[in-house]
Image: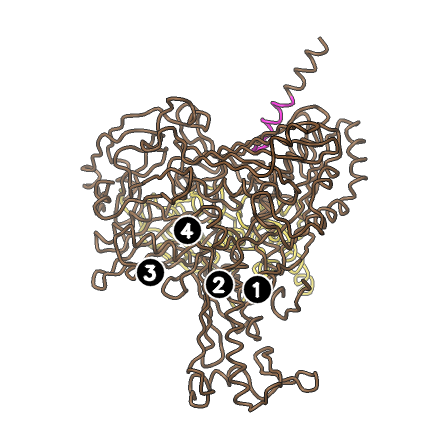
Amino acid sequence: MAAEIFHHIGKPHLRKEDVRLLTGLGRYIDDIEVPQALHACFVRSPHAHARIVRIDTTEAVSMPGVVAVFTGEDLVQWTTRQRMAPPIDGLRPMEMDALPMDKVRFQGDPVACVIATNRYLAEDAVEVVEIQWEVLPAVASMEQALRPNAPRVDDAVPDNLLSHQSAKYGDLPEAMVSAHRVVVSTFSQHRQTHLPIETRGCIADWDLGREHLTFHVGSQVPHPLRTTLASRLKLAESQVTVISPDVGGGFGQKIALYREELTVAAASIQLGKPVRWREDRMENLLASSQSREDFCRTRAAVDATGKVLGLELEITEDFGAYSFYPGNYLARVVAMIVTGPYRITNYAYDVKVVLTNKVGNGPMRAPMAVTSWVMDGTLDAIARELRLDPVEVRRVNMLRDYELPFTMATGEVLADVTPSATMEAVVSAIDYPALRQRQKQARDKGCWLGIGFCNVVESTTYGSQFYKSAGISGSGHEAAWIRIEPSGWINASVGLGATGQGYESSLANAVAEGLGISPEKVRLHMGHTDIAPYGMGSRGARGGTAGGGTLYLCAQQARDAVLKIAAFTLGVTKGVQLRMMDGRVQQSLGGVWTNTHLGLEDIARIAYLDPIALPSDMKPGLEFHLTYDPPPMTYSNACHACIVEVNGVTGAIKIERYIVAEDCGTVLSPVVVEGQQHGAIAMGLSGALLEHVEYDLATGQNLSGTLADYLVATSHEIPHMEIIGMHTPNSRTPAGIKGMAEGGVMGAIGAITNAVNDALSHLGVVVNQQPLTPMYLQNLLRQVKQQTKEVHS
Amino acid sequence: MSREQSITLTVNGKNISFQVEPRKLLSDALREDCRLTGTHVGCEHGVCGACTVLVDGRPTRACLTFAVQMEGHEVTTIEEIGTPSHLSPLQQALHECHGLQCGFCTPGIVMTFEAYLKENPNPSEAQIRENLSGNLCRCTGYQNIVKAIALAAKRMRESAHHGS
């Protein structure tokens, strides 16, 4: 598809959000003043797994400033249970109360809520809530969870196996039998957390007279959150307004309705007063959603050239203790797309999701992050075993342009992707042959350079059809409205939930393009359920295609109406072409576009204030509403290359160069897209190198409750990132938009790990787990020395 | 609960007095008692840097400081640095270089470098990264923040040069 020519889409306008955020005038949850608001603070379990024998709140209730102390026994009267039981084969149902009454399932599980006149007093009272526990043995790892007779995390899930699904495509047994070799690789990804710099928080304000709840909360999905909140409070959906103001980062952590939020809302209704809650950082690290912990094993049947004849993938995911999402929600996508840009038709997967006494998992920026590391890490293992060049092995297996669109073994259709182009661009940019030469020379001097590649096919957008075919409940459609006001200014809205992506700027470009006006005239209103139309919010890199696409189509509808009024007003005959350009109506005279005397403000004036002058089949006003269900999936693609130096003495990793070629289709705003690429790569590198939610294997205690323990990359660790941009439009979406913003994570964790393996390849050790800490690498190196000694002695 | 004390300090050039519990954090006092909500609280243990303010001109973690310690001191917050119609050179550069996304860590970064660039008008990229490493940003990957700080420094040097 030839690229369309755009006037506003793709222009590097600076962000509209910036000025208020730079001057301290942003409005995050804690900045909203609510007179007379009470403050909530939660009593949390000190144990990973324990029965609640008795909760004594007597002393807490009598503390200064304390208004109430609520426990699960109170909440159960005012709320419904959450039941997570979509009809999916191999998935067991799970239920959850507002606050647990029988037992706690992880350290940090909330069991009671103190409401006081200020936060300091609420925290004082939390200290004196007396709880008698009967401590139970904890399940602190996947391996422990699957042991026979393991303690049950959820009494209704007998063997801790929440979900188990498998599928086979093609003839894998034949591929294994006829293979030159079968290469086995493992990949162990560790538990991480989203760590938005603004923690969670909310303000619930019950209006007793109107019987209406106003709920301020930083949310990626304001409308779905409203649906769940109303239902669990036994309210009509018309009785709840969710307002999500400026949000200090989400990354997937601000999607589900948390039990703390439900409790605060119920408390406000019971007390008839506004109640607010701000999570502190320790609570964020102990009790907000976590992600990623899984173990993958691949078995690749290959011929002598490294061509993959068949692939088998096993995944076991540690899902934590509660089901805020269906158990198959995260790992299933990995299994469906793992073959990525490679021609692999004989394929089978087996995915197990197990429960442990840890925080319940949720999607984190690139929930399928491990995918590309698993696939490209497998190809690197093949290259090592067969003594082939890793780039050559990728070339042998990669889909050629003429093979596209390509239906993957699982039925997913790859279209409008350019994996060869992105890989060759990167290979050429780093001067690969020269780099291999330099690596050899460096190695002779005892300096260990490594070159790692990772090809990424990033699943984005997730239309309704994908959910249906993956057996996951949910819809992927989006909704928008656009109003051309009587003065010619534009208000617009869409059901996304901004958490820093710059929607007010990038989406203004989409509206401006569709309508033929300047983006300066457009103002986006989001994050308010009474203002925005019901949409599915922000997740799965759907903002661009679902959000931007819906607005673009809605703007075109508005433009058509404007031009119809213009044609009628100008009295132009059929065959004369009109268009909107920068807010002016233009007509084509002899192939040249010329301004007419009409501007958008003139049309708006007629539509609102002189409707008699409209064409007879048109109604007054210029208000437009549109819903749109995007294709089941749109794919962006990229190749990441990372060059590292590993210190053989300390195990430290230094990133010498980081370069990416990414094809993410038509971009609404190159400014925003570059920022998303940087941010995603940084999150991937930070996760692969440092971040680790760690639980003690004996007690299930969380060992990473502060930012001194949960390390996150600073400006020191994140390298300069070079980006080669490519823009092949998607042929099935409005304006050719594809999603992006998660692929950077996928590529980064693969590229850095593959690079470290490349640096150590001459030693015969394989790095197969993250994080790549100096301790871990030193340990591996020590084993090599030990083995060498044994051989020589 | 301990008894409230009266304190007098200067906030953004204005002398103010108010009653405060000795345990109240400076970050909470600025946000609640002074209604200056541009100072953000990200970790309450001094790691993330979002709450950075200037105390007598030096960058300080407001979450590791008690309000009562500020008796007689001069506190400067993000609200004093620039206004929407008049951004500081650093704020302007952050805007132009896309040096912020969600914006939650941004005031802390601005405060850190408003002070730093006064003493270090010509920092190298390595020096910028070194000094920025006390502020966590989860959105940007730091690259455009580094770029913005270098641009602001350059412009400030040029305008100092022209002004002299």
On the rendered image, what quadrant is the C terminus of chain A found in?
Answer: top right
Q: Residues within 10 Å of mark 1 (few under 14, many from 20)?
A: many
Q: Which residue is mark 3?
A: A241
- As shown in the figure, which amino acid type bears the numbered disc 4? Gly
Q: Residues within 10 Å of mark 2 (few under 14, many from 20)?
A: some
- Quadrant assignment for the N terminus of chain A: bottom right
Instruction: Specify the label residue B72 is tagged with.
Output: 4
> In 3D space, how far apart are the residues under numbered discs 3 and 4 (Cα atoms)?
45 Å
| Cα–Cα gap, marks 4 and 2 | 60 Å
What amino acid is at disc 3? Thr
> Residue A628: which numbered mark, if any?
2
Viewer-nearest of discs 3 and 4: 3
Same chain check for tags 1 and 2: yes
Q: Nearer the viewer, residue A229 or B58?
A: A229
Residue depicted at 65% across the width and 15% down the height: A786
The residue at 61%/69% (across/down) is A8
Is residue A633 at least partly visible in the picture? yes
Give the extent of the magenta segment: A770-781
- Secondary structure under tag 2 reads strand
